[in-house]
Amino acid sequence: MATYTKAIKVAELAPGTKRTVVVNGKRIAIANIDGVFFAIDDTCSHAHCSLGTEGFLDGSAIICGCHGAQFDVTSGKVLSPPAPIDLTSYKTKVEGEDVLIAV
């Protein structure tokens, strides 16, 4: 069974936005897509840039601000090069006012 840890308050991440959070020492990009929260590794697998801080959100795609690699924020899958490998995605859930991530 997954152990969930509080990452952010629901009110801190409006729909259509993303940011970087640190959960249990791990940097994670968290995005709010139409009120549903998704979490993937924060570091692009191409040039090691932060997706949550330097990236851009376009629907469910997160685009790396360094070289334009694209990932599906719902799964961590590479959508477009130059990223060579998929990122890990993490389960999320909302409890009250908090978004929790299983890391």
Image (spheres, rainbow, N blue to C red):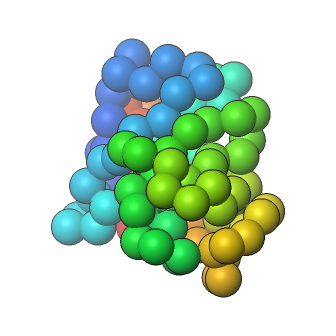
Question: Where does the image place residue 64, in percent across and percent down from the top left?
Answer: 55, 54
- Of 16 and 53, the residue lying toward us: 53
Q: Nearer the viewer, residue 91 or 46?
A: 46
Q: Can residue 27 be seen in this view?
A: yes
Query: Can you give x and y, in whole percent of width and height, for residue 35 in the image?
Result: 63, 24
The residue drawn where x is 70% and y is 35% is: 58
Residue 89 sits above or below residue 55 on the image? below
Is residue 58 shown above or below 11? below
Residue 36, x across and y down, in percent: 64, 33
Which is nearer the eye, 49 or 73?
49
**Camera-nearest residue between 93 and 60:** 60
Q: Which residue is drawn at 66% across and 83% down?
A: 84
Residue displayed at 58% across by 20% down:
15
Quarter holding the C terminus?
bottom left
Q: Can residue 100 be seen in this view?
A: no
Q: Which residue lies furthest to the bottom in this view?
A: 84
* Count of numbered circles on the image: 0
The residue at the far left in this view is 25
Q: Is residue 11 above or below residue 32?
A: above
Which residue is drawn at the image coordinates 61% and 24% (left, top)?
A: 16
The residue sitting at the right extreme is: 79
To which quarter of the image does residue 83 belong?
bottom right
Percent from the top left, x then y, of residue 3? 39, 65
Above or below residue 61? Residue 24 is below
Q: Does residue 27 appear left or right of residue 72 in this picture?
A: left
